[in-house]
Amino acid sequence: MQEKNTLNTKKAYLFGSPVSHSISPKMHNYSFDKLGVDATYSAVDIALDNIDSVTSYIRSDDFLGANLTMPLKTGIIKYLDELDITSRLSGAVNTIVRKNDKLWGYTTDGAGFIDSLKEIDVEIPKKKILILGAGGAAKSIITKCAIDKAKKITIAKRFNKTINDVKAFAENVSSETNCVVEVIDIEDRSALKNAINNHDILINATPVGMTSNNTLIDKSMLRPSLIVCDLIYEPEMTMLLKDAKECGCKYINGKYMLLYQGARSFKLWTNKDMPVEEVKQKYFD
Ligand code: NAP
């Protein structure tokens, strides 16, 4: 292994709060070492009111790039020079990349989610997708699925103070990609049941099921041909996924989305492929 922390060593980071639990430093540092990239990756706890502490640093010469997690994914945007289309439409950045003297914002969550579906032999083109929730992760997935030629995307969301923003987001993605994107009220049980019956893929992009044995979907609404995805990876089997398994559905949790979004960021920083199979065996299986 080459010596790290020399004057030439490039620095990559995960910024956000909390970050101490993150697996990202392990997967990126392992991959840098394996591929002989002279770089290190560290997680640094940065709250939103402390964002100024990173905005000048990311212009420094040794900065390779960064991942952003909550609560910085939106707040960082005004400090960047350019956004790729997925970040521009979703309004979120989870990866900063330096290209020449410019800082670019990307979001790899959506592509990472789509990459993870190959684990269950599922592809996005021509699929009708129903997604629960419209937060940062949902928007990144919706945008990328629309770009990747999903047939239709329906967002099921509470009709609360963010509904108008989400409707505007849906219209914008629809007009920029030609994919039909609609919004329904997640609390309208009959509309939700009807939507599940008419879609191929169901994605839980809410935190419901993370800290309690709870689900937004009655088991009776599931059918064996439905593909069920939960972005949650701890616990590995949420109540929604347990129900999906019992109903005979194909299902997947968010563990491999985390792996593949990291692999996408790694490629953007280094132009090299992360040794995904090794990283998977070491840290994800
Ligand atoms: P977020 O921005 O806070 O958005 C959460 C969304 O869930 C919002 O649309 C919110 O609805 C909705 N929601 C929350 N509680 C709800 C409830 N009781 N009923 C209905 N809707 C509810 O969060 P995020 O960053 O998008 O993350 C969402 C989930 O994805 C989390 O569980 C997170 O851990 C997971 N995630 C996984 C990965 C991965 O790599 N696997 C990556 C990112 C996120 P309102 O709009 O009505 O407030």
Image (tube, helix red, strand yellow):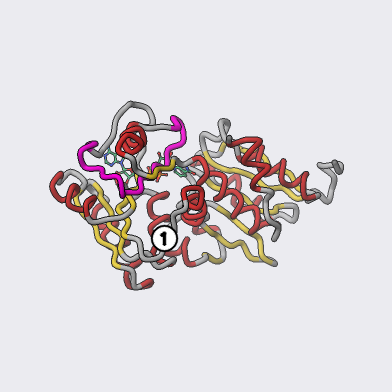
Q: Quadrant of the C terminus?
A: top right
Which span is picked out in magenta? 218-236
Q: Quadrant of residue 232?
A: top left
Residue 118 sits inside the magenta stretch: no
Q: Position of residue 80 (x, y in %)?
A: 55, 60
Q: Quadrant of residue 124?
A: bottom left
Q: Position of residue 25 (x, y in %)?
A: 65, 39
Q: Position of residue 70 (x, y in %)?
A: 47, 42
Q: Dot 1 corresponds to which residue? A: 124
Q: Main secondary structure of the magenta part?
A: loop
Q: Is residue 76 visible to the viewer in this orientation of the structure?
A: no
Furthest-top residue in this view: 212
Q: How many marks?
A: 1
Residue 232 sits inside the magenta stretch: yes
Q: Nearer the viewer, residue 195 or 47?
A: 195
**Residue displayed at 71% across by 57% down:** 272
Q: Nearer the viewer, residue 213 or 51?
A: 213
Crowd class of label 1 (few under 14; some 14 to 19; many from 20; radius 10 Å): many
What's under tag 1, amino acid-wise?
Answer: Ile
